[in-house]
Amino acid sequence: MRNNLLALLAKKVSADKSVVFIVGDLGYGLVEPFMKQFPKQFLNAGVAEGNMVGVAAGMSLEGFTPVCYTIGTFMSLRPLEQIRDDVCVRNLNVKLIGIGAGYGYSIYGPTHHSNDDIGILRNLPNMVILSPADPLELKGAFRVMFSHKGPVYLRLPRRSVEPIHTRTPHFKLGKSIIVKPGQDRFIFATGTMVTNALVAAKQLDIQGKPTGVVSFPTIKPIDHNFIANVAKRAKLIVTLEPHSVIGGLGSAVAEVLSEAGTKARFKRFGYPDQFVHVAGTEKYLEKKFGLDPGSVARHITKLF
Amino acid sequence: MTTSKITQLIRQMRREIIAISHRNHGSHVGSSLSIIDILAALYFNVMDVYPSQPWHPKRDRFILSKGHAALALYTVLAHRGFFPLRRLQTFIKDGSLLVGHPEGRTLPGVEATTGSLGHGLSVSAGMALAAKRRGSRNRIFVLLSDGECDEGEVWEAALFAAHHKLDNLTVILDYNKLQALGNTNVVLELEPFASKWQSFGFSVRQHGGHDMATLTKTLSRVPFTKNKPSVLIAQTTMGKGVSFMEDKLAWHYLEPTKEHLERAQGELR
């Protein structure tokens, strides 16, 4: 969805001279047109992510709206202290975009696998975390990213995604989006896994186990009210995310469910708490960890 | 302010730093005494500041990257008129905004939150770049400790500042050669320090860090070289001004006792 993002950014900087797009020396073949068209609103900070975020904080203090951009691991891990101390502590208007959520950079090994970013950033006060499912949700997420005046982490897949919505959904910060209505069986999903959830749900329909699908394009703040309400009548809730089962959407939902109380059977689907040491495509790894639609449908059938 | 008035004021500020640290159980006395002359030069002689409009757009900016010397900054800000003097007495007390490391934009005059070493140069480089892009003429000053230069981020920021020709940015280094557990040359040797900054593209000056006239002269003449960020390596003494504190590692940490306070007040009369 990087191309969608760049198109949205180009429109944004034309309209708003305070926005500056800061990259950590990547985006070859992607950012050059932007660099050419908006040289005064572009900055390549080099391979120095800690300094990049500190510089963004300084620019934000002076009235600019910096948008930092690099691969998910380098956006969330390397400059974590700067994100926390320079940006979040003062609730500065700095946007951070991490590319390659989940195994987006699969063949490049664990240094590029971003399966812990949500877990780690969720712990930071003032941090907003967005994870749109498709280009249409991205439009809403992008708009909300700027209307919210504070730190925002936008998590995007590396690859392009086919739209799952037929038209642009109504997008509100902190609100989930019902993609397929359900009665008492639900998959709560985020990012590229919403697509997998939909395919799995259609298979479950055929098996006579109709299952609703809800997209969570905002992970922090989590849609507490919606989850607590569903918890009252649901018999099954599973979460599905391109992220570790620890700390991401599943954990956020579990936190709400355990405090709200529910009779529903609950399970988190996501990547297991382990590193991957072999190469493989994203699809290969999804299958390996049972997160492809067929496997998800099978697991759910066994559960309930 | 006349030279004799400012000399008197600085003595008074030294007394206050020790007194408040004693009463409120504060630490880092030696660190604060090391930089009080630099801060006084900046806030009384060099920088354009507007104490009654602390966020005035034309103001020069100062960031204390060496955040643990917060009390020195608060003392100078109070005397310069950013907030009432009596507020100094609330240093690190329950509910006070005078926190152990400066908290940005809550207290008038404090530009940024610091306390974790190594962040300040990046943040001030961002402010300097913003000023350049906006066409503003304000200057940005940032004070680093020597031990702080162990942090890699400092050098990331240095590369950045020189590359972007941030000649509106001035770094002041509190080179008292003492860090947390020992001399800098025992922990992580910084020498040749001046040539490191020079090779990173800075225009370098190096001299004593306690003489008001020299400090004022140098810091008023920034940028030292057009298109290059400036750095003043200020040769300072930890605990300067009190004989039993000078150049003593322990005074990085000790809380002054009543006896320390009385001895110090005597010397600083």
Image (cartoon, coloured by chain):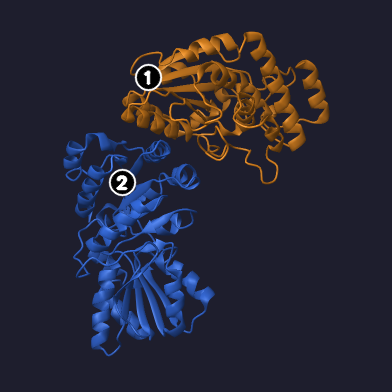
Chain colours: A blue, B orange
Which quadrant of the figure has residue B164? top left
What is the chain identity of the residue bearing mark 2?
A
Question: Residue placed at 70% from the left, 38% from the top?
Answer: B90
Q: Are marks 2 and 1 in contact (CB under 8 Å)?
A: no
Which quadrant of the figure has residue A53? top left
Residue identifier under label 2? A69
Residue A202 placement (x, y as % from top left): 24, 81
**Outermost residue to the bottom:** A208
Residue B234 seen: yes
Q: Which mark is residue B131?
A: none
Question: Residue placed at 70% from the left, 46% from the top?
Answer: B94
Give the crowd class for mark 1: few <14, some 14-19, many >=20 residues within 10 Å: few
In the rendered image, residues at marks 2 and 1 fall on the same chain: no
Residue identifier under label 1? B199
Residue B242 lies left or right of residue A252; in this view the side is: right
Question: What amino acid type should be assigned to the residue bearing mark 1?
Answer: Ser
Secondary element at tag 2:
strand
Alpha carbons under labels 2 and 1: distance apart = 29 Å
Residue B180 seen: no
Q: Nearer the viewer, mark 2 or mark 1?
A: 2
The residue lying toward the viewer, choosing from A18 and A264, is A18
